[in-house]
Amino acid sequence: MSESSAAVSELEILEAADMILEADYPIALTGAGMSVESGIPPFRGPGGLWTKNGEPPMNGFQIFMADPKRAWEARLARQHDELYAPLRTARFNPGHQALVELEQMGVLRFVITQNIDDLHRQAGQQELAEIHGNWSLIRCLECGSRYPWDTVSLAVLPPRCGKCGGLMKSDTVAFGEPIPPDVLKLCAERSALADLVILVGTSATVYPAAGFALQVKERGGRMIEINLYESELTAQCDISLRGGSAVMMPRLTAVLAKKRRAAMA
């Protein structure tokens, strides 16, 4: 357990648990901090891929559309690079499992993740929107259908959708690419119902994901932060639990479960 995680008192955990139980429709917004705890390198900050190698082109989607075949060839050549090799071996951590437990308890109603790593799905999260896509899927740009990579033939590039014949690309959202409308609609609908949002491992500064969390707060809802570091939103949070999600989420979930059992006894 990290020093910061250990410093969070049981009183703070109890206060956060009470706040969540008082809410009618709690949701969570998760970010790169959760991925890092599963061994996936971040993009920004110390040791980040973009910090070391420079940021990718800000017009990645336009580059793809200009020459999809060449873009696919470049993507396939990166199968085992610094980003994709860790994604292949990463496993969900206790923070992911705790969020699934909260969903199964009927406490947590929805998760919006900014992560592309597929770990929430692997852990068993059902009510989920991957706002930046999922690295393990291929998406049709015409009809929006998604397919696991191993079900799509890449013998001819670029691949075409088996349902509508449309052009397909990796489901991960490139710079310059609009968020897929089905995901954006789902996030908007669910966050509009929320009266509490738990920020887990995210600074909540990347839009439009951050906007959904801020809208909950602006409507008078509450915001709980679980993060190793202070963020730009810490001052706006009702409670800020300083620590990693793999430690703090199980602590919080255990208290919530105990309180629910006591209430039903």
Image (cartoon, helix red, strand yellow):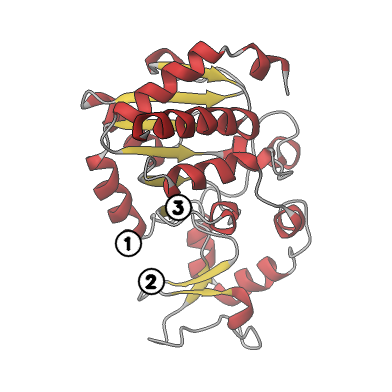
Q: Does residue 54 appear anywhere in the picture?
A: no
Q: Quadrant of residue 158?
A: bottom right
Instruction: Find numbered disc 1 in the image and state the secondary structure of the residue it sits on.
Output: helix
Viewer-side residue, 134 vs 69: 134
Picture coordinates of residue 164, whole percent (x, y): 38, 86
| Mark sitting earlier along the chain (1/3) | 3
95 with respect to 107 (left or right): right
Mark 2 packing: few (<14 Cα in 10 Å), some, or many (20+)? some
Instruction: Kindly identify the amino acid type of the residue bearing the numbered disc 2.
Output: Gly
Q: Does residue 70 appear anywhere in the picture?
A: yes
Residue to which mark 2 is pinned: 144
Q: What residue is at 50 percent from the left and 45 percent from the top?
A: 101
Mark 1 packing: few (<14 Cα in 10 Å), some, or many (20+)? few
Residue 190's place in the image compared with 170, above or below, is above
Residue to which mark 3 is pinned: 176
Picture coordinates of residue 213, whole percent (x, y): 35, 33
Residue to which mark 1 is pinned: 182
